[in-house]
Amino acid sequence: MGKITTGATTMSLDGYIAGPEESGFDLLFQWYANGDVEIPSSSPDVPPFHVSAASAELIRREWGNTGALLVGRHLYDMTNAWGGRHPMGVTTVVLTHRRPEDRPADDENFVFVTDGIEAAVAVAKELAGEKDVVVNGGQMARQCLEAGLLDEVGVALVPVVLGSGKTLFGELGVVPVQFDGPVEVVEGTGVTHLRYRVRR
């Protein structure tokens, strides 16, 4: 059985995954374009990444181990559904209060769940099979952690200070939470990849 992980959440040195009013992504995601190794994208709207060799090795391994994604409706809308398919090329489960009108049925690209985080994780785990479920977005990560469903946290720490904005776990309702690790540290170019296990 695979694990439930936040994947590689890009974070500033002062702990923000987005700046004020959804700003700062140009600074946070510079590492996606500062290397010589191409990582193809399955999204028609997201170009291939060009990262360092160390980052590429980690991304390829983790993408290869991912069987499904779990995101919230906010991220789905903000990215315009990645043009119809997520760059990772796996089915994305979207937790939402209501299904988008332009997607009346689930397909291999998107599955919509309206019954809460536990139901969304269950659907994602079924889709993933023996592979991992990657949770994208701070709100989804917070809900999974609060529900005791999160196994691992991945952070891509970048050398920028945003000053304010959105944190990974937001207003977490169960604190403190302790983690073991880092269980993995990979030094890329302009980014340090960190992995922590949630302590049970």
Image (spheres, grey):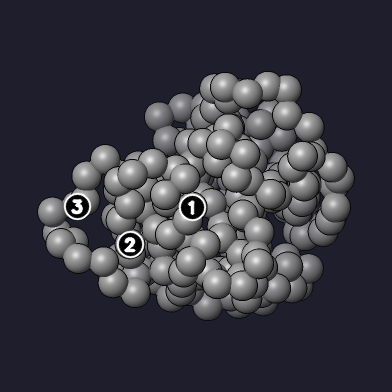
Mark 3–mark 1 distance (CA, rounded to whole Å): 20 Å
Work out which quarter of the rendered image holds the C terminus and state it. Answer: top right
Residue that carries the numbered disc 1 in the rendered image? 121
- Mark 2: amino acid: Val
The residue under the point 55% across, 72% down is 129
Q: Is 147 placed left or right of 103 in the picture?
A: right
Labelled disc at residue 151: none
Q: Choose between 147 and 186: the one closer to the eye.
A: 147
- Mark 3: amino acid: Pro
Sequence-first disc among 2 and 1? 2
The residue under the point 52% across, 62% down is 125
Image depth: mark 3 or mark 1 in front: 1
Labelled disc at residue 111: 2
Sequence-first disc among 3 and 2? 3
**Cβ atoms at labels 2 and 1 below 8 Å apart:** no
Q: Secondary structure at mark 3?
A: loop
Labelled disc at residue 100: 3
